[in-house]
Amino acid sequence: MREMTFINAIREAIEQEMRADESVFVVGQDVRGGVYPHTLDLIDEFGPDRIVDTPIAETAMHGVAFGSALLGYRPIVDFMFASTALTAFTETSVMSGQQYFLHGSKHPAPLVMTGAWGVGKRTANDHAMPIHGYYMRAPGLKVCSPSTPHDAKGLFTAAIRDNNPVMIPWCTGIMMLKGDVPEESYEIPIDKASIKRTGDDVTVLANSEQLQFALKVADKLEGEIDVEIIDPISFAPIDIETILQSLEKTNRLVVVDEDWESGGFAATVSAQVMEQGFDLLDAPVTRVTLPNMPIPGGYMEDYIRPNPKKIEAAIRAVCA
Amino acid sequence: MAKDYVMPKLAMAMNEGTVTEWLIEEGAQVNKGDIIASIETEKTAYDLESPESGLFHIISPAGETVDCGTLIGKFAEDEAEFATLQQEQPAPTIAPVAEPTLADAAPQAAAPAVATQPAAVVATQPGGRVIASPLARKLASDRNLTLTLISGTGPGGRIVKRDILAAETSGVGRAAPAMSAGGRIEKARIAVKGPRKTIAERMTQSLQSTAQLSSFWESDITNLLAMRKKYVAREDQLGTRVSVNTFIAKAIVYGIRQVPIANACMEGDEIVIFDNINLGFAVSMPGQTEYDTTLLVPVLHNIENLGLVELDIRIKELVERVRDGRFTDDDLSGSTITLSTTAGLAPPGHRSTPVLNLPNAMLIGPSTSVEKPVVVDGQVVPRMLLPVSATFDHRVLDGDPAVRFMSAVHDALENPELLMA
Amino acid sequence: MSLTKKQMVTLYTNLVRADKFGKMMYSRMMQGKLIGFYHPADGAIAPGVGACSFLNNDDILFPHHRGHGITHMLSKGIDVSPYIAEHAGKATGCCRGRAAWHYAFPEHNVYGTTAYIGHNFVPVTGFGWAAKRNGTEQVVMNCFGDGAMGTGRAHEGLLMSSIWDLPIVHLCENNGYAIFAEASEMHPTEDMATVAQGLDIPSVLVDGQDVFAVAEAVNAAVDSARKGQGPTFIEAKTLRFKEHDIGNRDLRGYKPRPQEEYDEMAKRDPVNLATDRILADKILTQNKIDKIHDEADQEVEAAVKFADDSPIESPTEEELLADVYAPR
């Protein structure tokens, strides 16, 4: 099994799907040159008709994807930084999400939307902010994000093959994370959570770079507290079954989400667990999230971000 | 056939109730119509009449809030049935702590599972709600365990799963035992802090730092009561229902006029006799639990020139403020003499040796009056006699002025027209 | 004039049908039988007819919201009965009654509309890109009003169609009004076309009350697009006889439109103008004209009946949820 970085695993997914299916193409700003490695040099193999640069116009950029998706293509629109998708929020959420259902569920609009995000590089709000909290509320969209190189290739492949609009942002914090990635083409389920570590005492949900932090904390607590770690992977729909099943065993839940506290995944899953698994809880659900403030640049960022210390404190509190 | 007893719905708007106190014991023979429990609803308190007769088995412990219609007890027809009921669901408490026969023997459990009875080291909110995780509640309910018996080891004393499991293996007990040495079973533990601590210290200090002693007498208040009746008849006009206590306060003022040294205190190596009269007025208030109380002595300043009605109004207003918690530091300080009554609470004719309220040198303690045969003009007639116990500090005043003061008070009580002098 | 006689008859027929469908929709709205809004195209039907009458089935159409695309779609040869049913919320509607009036006919290459003015440029850009990539001479007919020209999306869409030579005909049906605000107040120039010219897109101005003139201009633009020569901007100057949407006031700015305006507009009724032209050029006899009108009436009646006879769906929440995502 060979090792690969997270970002190159994404590249391989795109590359292999574009080889397998003529209708797949990438559109975005400067994707030919490749600001990030996941589209780097793809133009050499696939040409400018399938690696398409656009002017800086997120709405029309999305329009290229959306319109051609309705005509049978399978586009990947790369917003470069996830937060710029918000300049085309109506298009990416409302227009994309409602197309299939509101028109009688007859004609799908398969498109993949992606962009980079991640707190921790001191770049402040615009380049760092998470968007999965905003988009998971858009009915009709699937929203997911991978946390390991293996999952990155499998999830992007699944997203490209899915017949719905999929928002799949990727985290810069794990861009260079190395891991085993199979050479052949494969998918992982687009709407299922993945158990990354089994344990008996407490269930911890964590995604993207936070998954790595949680794994570190679990190793540290070995022998003292037995931590089960689940990567939710899918934010819409939420795989609540896997989480509830885990709670049958542990009765304690910590939700780590590198997103603002208000609304979003941590709040939604807490409410769902409370509704559907009330009697399983031996302690209140504890969330580790960003406080509700614009993400500051510079060193101030370090204070607000979920990190191993905060995760450990939450685990201890819930196990008290 | 055992009969259920549920939390009654006493009003349209009532949704839940709390048994604040069971007024009968587990297993007591109850007759229909007996008052068996005090409850509190969202609005008020009620005493509940028993709807049935039988041997009563308590299910809902005192302090737990339940919805209307929830089973809180059962009536057994006979001992056998009662034993069965106890087997099904052991009662929250067995024999009361006061019974001496249980002190040596291991507690006789009608239901074997009820081996040790814990004190309530249970996290409760005001209103009696037990704090337990949803999981713990479900486990307890599945296993028929009563949460108020179980001690919580979670954060804030929350009952969590491990506590239920521990309770299960050790019988209806708790994770940590609280059986005191000598076979005594705790009913409650009250921290001696705050007001309780203050009272404890002050009382001890008063008894240890003075030369106080108590005297008793009886005053015929038949005439006083007749006079009072006239005031009571004009209640609306006067704006208050004049109390006997107010008459007694006025009698104290009269007494001090005759014997000023009764209104004095010891300061360092000087006796200070005061010109104005600030009356300390002992008020009993609820304590930390249903068992204990708190004592406050608010002070009504400058009563020497107040008329009966005005004095009555002010006393009542002060007491109300204190009970509501709306009192200031001034309200609690500066007394020169204290009135501490147990009338209505103590048994008729009750006498005692009340403890001086330092730094006062004199305290008047009337109690429950009693009708007795008295010789008046050679005839034996029934009269209302008020027992009064008075404590004074012999360092400040000797027996001579002390009893002269008491006589003056007695005189005014028996001849209430003197109160207008 | 490059139109054949046959083409002129087709145009005239479609115009009459559009007129009658439009009047029917207006009266149905007043009867409370339509769901949602209706934006009447009275006086403004010629551009849609001229633009769509000669499109192929695989050409992609984004209709203008005025007239709810009925004009455009029936001209393109689409049976609009399912749309009339859709607009009544019926299960037999083209979108199973779930679209309100934002219909789609994917099999006829109509993919939906939008409430957001100017957003038409977004998917249209994608349609154009895909059409070009397909290489089968498909053309995109992008219809919108003067109001859309105020949006940034119009700029972006026009720009992209220009840099990539996309096969799009941008048809601006300029009736001089947004809802109440006049185009003259909301645009710096009299012609919307100046924006397109600034983006290097060939532009044409045409009389939007003359269905034949519109058709000629469109045919040329479509031809050009099919040949890979890129987009054309056609500005049809047209009129709005009635209010923006039924139930709204009909204001100019913020004062009622004066009677003189209505009188002047009435002189340029597109159906009258077309009838006069057809008769003058001896394309059709009066008899034939009457027949066209009658057949159009019957067509409208049939569509109405179909809509009225159709049931309303009553799915459970679970059934609706199951329809949200497309399966693999």
Image: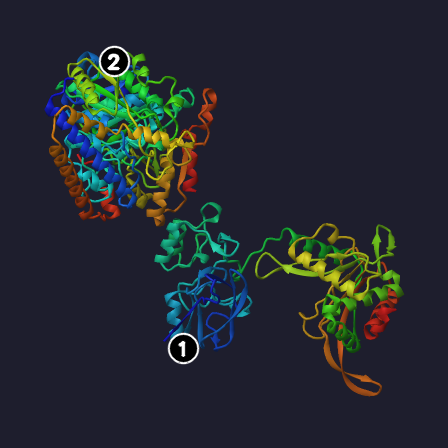
- Apparent side of residue A22 relative to residue C264 in the rendered image (left or right): left
Residue placed under numbered mark 1 in the picture? B78
* Residue B342 marker: none
Residue B374 versus residue C211 in the image, above or below: below
Horizontal and vertical percent position of residue C138: 15, 21
- Identified by mark 1, the residue type is Asp
- Identified by mark 2, the residue type is Pro
The image quadrant that residue A78 belongs to is top left
Front in this rendered view, residue B329 or C110: C110
Residue placed under numbered mark 2 in the picture? C202
- Apparent side of residue B157 relative to residue B228 in the rendered image (left or right): left
Horizontal and vertical percent position of residue A4: 24, 20
Horizontal and vertical percent position of residue C274: 20, 27
- Apparent side of residue B393 relative to residue A148 in the rendered image (left or right): right
Chain of the residue that carries numbered disc 2 in the rendered image: C
Q: Characterize the local packing of mark 2: few (<14), some (14-19) or many (20 or more) Cα atoms within 10 angstroms.
A: some
